[in-house]
Amino acid sequence: TEWFNPHRQYAFLRKYENELLLIAANFDESDTQVRLNIPSHAFDYFKLPTLDNAVGTELLTGDTVQFVLSPEIPATLHVPGYSGAIVKIKLYLSKAKNKITIISRIPFQDTIVIHQLIGNSPKVLSSYIR
């Protein structure tokens, strides 16, 4: 497609404990906005929540990035030409009575976003600046 060329771009996920990495490589000379379809079995395998506003740190630049983390909506990510992007999302999971709370800290902005998941319905509980 125009948003992802499997001959020029490559992407994968890795998760360890409370950190999720979304890694994308661009083997084309042009910068691109890739749209990554993350399959539902990846959400099941990694026990990931669906988030309308996932916040992560792009480790190669230090920039804060926001995107949708969902099996139904592609995650959009900027990847420079002949380069890559590594986005780290910290997930602080607290399980209690079918409820999961995820706290995402937006680096360099001292902003904290708290998502709460009850069943499969995500909801932003609060966003505040320290």
Image: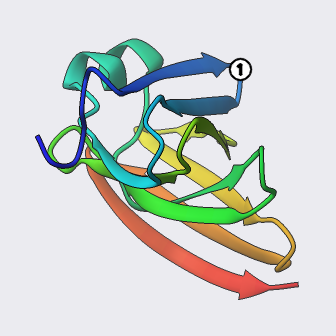
Q: In the visual, does 105 lie left or right of 87?
A: right
Q: Which of 51 and 86 is in front in this view?
A: 86
Q: Which of 105 and 25 is in front in this view?
A: 25
Dividing the picture into quarters, in which one does residue 16 lie? top right
Q: In which quarter of the image is the C terminus?
A: bottom right
Q: Position of residue 51 (x, y in %)?
A: 38, 55
Tell how many labels: 1
Picture quarter with the N terminus: top left
Which residue occupies the foreground of this view, 93 or 50? 50
Q: Which amino acid lies under the numbered mark 1 shown in the image of this protein?
A: Glu
Location of residue 63 with respect to 99 vertically, above or below: below
Q: Which residue lies furthest to the front in this view?
A: 29
User: In the drawing, does residue 42 fall left or right of residue 77?
Assistant: left
Position in image of residue 121 (x %, y %): 26, 55
* Residue at (59, 63) in percent of width and height: 65
Residue in the image at 61% along x and 31% along y: 20
Q: Residues within 10 Å of mark 1 (few under 14, many from 20)?
A: few
Residue 29: x and y in percent read 48, 42
Residue at mark 1: 17
**Percent x, y for residue 26?**
48, 34
Is any part of residue 119 visible from this angle? no
Residue at the spot 60% in from the left edge and 37% down from the top edge: 84
Q: Residue at x 63, y 70 (%)?
A: 113
- Element at badge 1? loop
Q: Which colour scheme is used?
A: rainbow
Residue 102 visible in the shown view:
yes
